[in-house]
Image: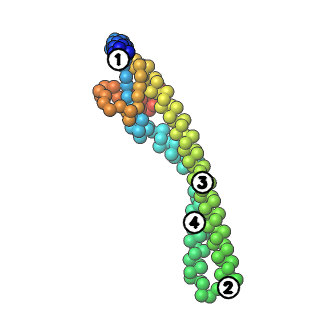
Amino acid sequence: MKTLIKSTVAAVAVSTALFAGAAQAQQKIGVVDMMEVFQQLPQREQISEQLQTEFQDRFEEMRRLEQKVQELRQKQERDASIMSASEKTQLERDLEQTISEAQLKSKALQEDTRRRQNEERNKLLGKVQDAITAVATDKDYDMVLESNAVTYMKADNDLSGAVVEKMTSGN
């Protein structure tokens, strides 16, 4: 029983000392809404256009393959009654081969575009992190948190607008 009382008193003393220290050293904490920042960045649109241009030939090739599959299916339906068995078999093989080719190329294209999007997003995220650090340093913040980790904050602690401004000004 005495041990329990001593432990409780010690815990209260330690927590009081910690809270007193925290009250003395008030920290300035900022918050950034990363989704808002990314949505407002003009670089996001530039990256999207760059990737569209980069993969344009492959997207066009996919459209041609899809069109070829559609044409083969139409021919199969339209001419089935007048085709010989060997022509039907050859058409079926051509159709299956074209579908397989389209599926393989589509999967490769999806993987490549996803990889490139991640690369570009990570580059942009690094620049946003640098901008956050610069804004926090300029405004003398001790810590910056993401808005989804905060349940309440004063509006003047939101650094999202300043980060976007920093990113768009190029400074």
Amino acid carrying mark 1 in the image: Met
Q: Is any part of residue 11 visible from this angle?
A: no
Amino acid carrying mark 2 in the image: Ala
Q: Position of residue 154 (x, y in %)?
A: 29, 27
- Mark positioned earlier in the residue sequence (1 or 4): 1
What residue is at 48 percent from the left and 38 percent from the top? 43
Label for residue 1? 1
Instruction: Using the numbered discs, state the Cα–Cα distance from disc 3 to disc 2 in whole angstroms.
Output: 36 Å
**Circle 3 is placed at which residue position?**
109
**Circle 2 is placed at which residue position?**
85
**Circle 4 is placed at which residue position?**
66
For the N terminus, the quadrant is top left
- Mark positioned earlier in the residue sequence (1 or 3): 1
- Mark positioned earlier in the residue sequence (3 or 2): 2
Which one is nearer the viewer's eye here, 84 or 13?
A: 13
Amino acid carrying mark 4 in the image: Glu
- Whether the residues at callouts 1 and 2 have beta carbons within 8 Å, the answer is no
Q: Position of residue 2 (x, y in %)?
A: 35, 14
Please name which of the two marks, 1 or 4, marks the residue nearer to the observer.
1
Q: Quick check: 30 left or right of 129?
A: left
Please name which of the two marks, 4 or 2, marks the residue nearer to the observer.
2
Q: Secondary structure at mark 3?
A: helix
Instruction: Using the numbered discs, state the Cα–Cα distance from disc 1 to disc 3 in whole angstroms.
Output: 70 Å
- Mark positioned earlier in the residue sequence (1 or 2): 1
